[in-house]
Amino acid sequence: MAQRKEIATVYGAGLIQGLALVTFPAASAVFTNPQDYGLSTTQYGAMFIPQVVTAVIASLLGAELRNRVGIKRIYLLGLGANLLSMALLVTSRFEMHEHRVAYDILLAATSFMGIGFGLTVPSLNTFAAVFFPKKVDRAVLVLNALLGLGTALAPVFIALFVGLGIWWAMPSAVAGLVLVLLLFSCLSLKDGASAHSKHKEKTKQSFPQRFWIFSGFILLYGICETMNGNWASLYMKNHFGSSAAISSLALSLFWGAITGGRVLFAALEKWFPERMVCRVLPLVVAAAFLSTAFASKKTASLGVIAFALAGLGCSALLPLTISFGQKELTAISGSVAGGLIAFYQIGYGLAAFGIGPVQKWFGAQLNIVFAASAGVALAMWAASFLVSKKSLSQA
């Protein structure tokens, strides 16, 4: 049985990982401001390509590395990558007006963020499942709720620091938190041998067909989440002409609703079974996309509400799919979280980078892209019946 210090460390790491992850998209206004970094929409989207590539590689290699060196070392390595990412982001401000140099540093920063995310998040999900083997769904939901809380707080802090003219204080603060967490984790977490032994497996064995169904669902989810998480601020600014504060509010409400939804559905487990949650929430996401796309440019408040609705729709889908996979695919349970995070990152990359080229090639405005994204959400809804099928048979 895990000690309280271990549990607090793992769940605290979820919160801090959320802060680190969204620091980059939360600062989108700084990156695209001509007086700051002056990035184009395409350059801003391309900034996340290294993050996606390294996150996918780290996620896929994570299971093999955990078998070799243990889950704790992989988790600590992920924290170290997060720390380096934040340090590079702060460093880039000193080269802000040397655009080529600054951009290269930003690419390096997002590369290390991908490594950190790809190693840390699957490890945290595995820790949570091992700590609470009889309540895996709830344990993973709560962990991801804290991760979501971090993602919700990041835009708030960025808006505060931007208002004070010291946006770089955000990654500096996150770096400090990661450093403290790294030191505390070294002392409080065990070497993970007991947790690791329960999930040790032959990582070279082929993945069953069901894994690919989960993966396809998560890829679609990654697109939907990132369309909101990475583009909400710019959408509010460009479509509604909103101020930086209102744009940050929309992004905060999106991530806040993700957090609140995860807590809500964990609490309603007895009355609203996970399989039904998995089937209903994609429709909420589709409705949010359509609401965002067709809201009048004069009604920014409707845009804010729509992004909050999108957060509620996205809330429980990722952690539930991970917990479904870990419970069902027992032969590869240690690889499930990392594999699904890899496909989540592929979806993230498609949405983070793809918008700039789509706008350039087809001349499509963001509202048209958001309307088209409703189709992705509906495809996710169709796939949800396959994802929840096994869970339904066990109900």
Image (spheres, rainbow, N blue to C red):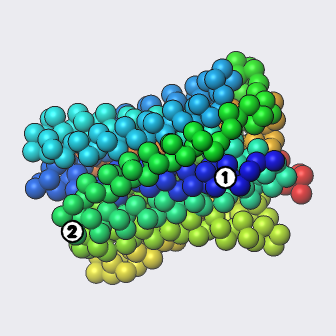
- Work out whether residue 332 or residue 379 is closer to the camera in this orientation and state it: 332
Residue 77 visible, this angle: yes
The three-letter amino acid code for the residue at tag 1 is Lys
Would you place residue 123 above or below residue 62 in this image?
below
Please report the residue visible at 72 percent of the width from the left and 27 percent of the height from the top.
Answer: 207
Camera-nearest label, 1 or 2 = 1
Instruction: Describe residue 239's horizontal placement relative to residue 153 as left or right.
Output: left
Instruction: Describe residue 95's horizontal placement relative to residue 247 as left or right.
Output: left
Q: Position of residue 239 (x, y in %)?
A: 28, 68
Q: Residues within 10 Å of mark 1 (few under 14, many from 20)?
A: some
Q: Which residue is mark 1?
A: 5
Task: Give the image quarter of residue 196.
Answer: top right
Query: Image quadrant for the C terminus?
Result: bottom right
Q: Which residue is mark 2?
A: 164
The three-letter amino acid code for the residue at tag 2 is Leu
Q: Residues within 10 Å of mark 2 (few under 14, many from 20)?
A: few
Please report the residue visible at 40 percent of the width from the left and 74 percent of the height from the top.
Answer: 304
Please report the residue visible at 51 percent of the width from the left and 32 percent of the height from the top.
Answer: 77
Task: Give the image quarter of residue 189.
Answer: top right
